[in-house]
Amino acid sequence: MNSTSYFFPEFHYPFPHLTRFLQADKLFTILLKDGSITHFEPSNVREFRNWLTQHQIEDLKDSSRRLRSFGMMAFGLQ
């Protein structure tokens, strides 16, 4: 699988239509640019996650960790 592919196998949306994702075990919840949400359970979780991150699709878990860390630093709590 080429991580720079426009489409991921078995997934119906090209990467430019994606905004953010959240992963829970093998299930991905994905926010599309039109505001709708889709769910996808890939046969190869690692490859799909790599495909998303290669295309700079935001991982909400990583974003929330960074925000919490920033908030703690702002209050001198880190």
Image (tube, rainbow, N blue to C red):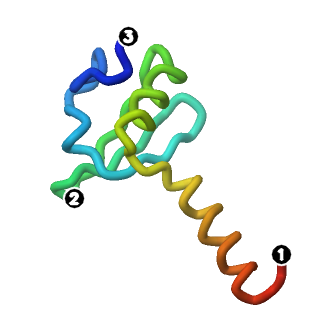
Q: Which residue is mark 1?
A: 78
- From the top left corner, tell me how far across and down residue 76 is, in percent: 81, 86
> Between disc 2 and disc 3, whose residue precedes?
3
Pointers 1 and 3 in contact (C-beta within 8 Å): no
| Residue, far top | 1
Quadrant (top left, top right, bottom left, bottom right) of the C terminus: bottom right
- From the top left corner, tell me how far across and down residue 69 is, in percent: 70, 70
> Between disc 1 and disc 2, whose residue precedes?
2
Answer with the quarter of the image where residue 30 lies.
top left
Give the number of the mark in front: 2 or 3.
3
In the image, residue 63 above or below residue 68: above
Q: How many residues crowd around disc 1 within 10 Å: few (fewer than 14), some, or many (20 or more)?
A: few
- Could you say whether the residue bearing mark 3 is in a helix, strand or loop? loop
Answer with the quarter of the image where residue 8 lies.
top left
Q: CA distance from mark 2 to mark 3?
A: 28 Å
- From the top left corner, tell me how far across and down residue 52 is, in percent: 40, 35
Pointers 1 and 2 in contact (C-beta within 8 Å): no
**Which label number is shown at residue 41?**
none
- Could you say whether the residue bearing mark 1 is in a helix, strand or loop? loop
Q: Which residue is mark 2?
A: 35
* Residue at horizontal 38 percent and vertical 45 percent from the top: 57
> Between disc 1 and disc 3, whose residue precedes?
3
In the image, residue 10 above or below residue 70: above
Amino acid type shown at disc 1: Gln
Give the number of the mark in front: 1 or 2.
1
* Residue at horizontal 48 percent and vertical 34 percent from the top: 27
Amino acid type shown at disc 3: Met
Amino acid type shown at disc 2: Gly
Q: CA distance from mark 1 to mark 2?
A: 35 Å
- Could you say whether the residue bearing mark 2 is in a helix, strand or loop? loop
Q: CA distance from mark 1 to mark 3?
A: 40 Å
**Which label number is shown at residue 1?**
3
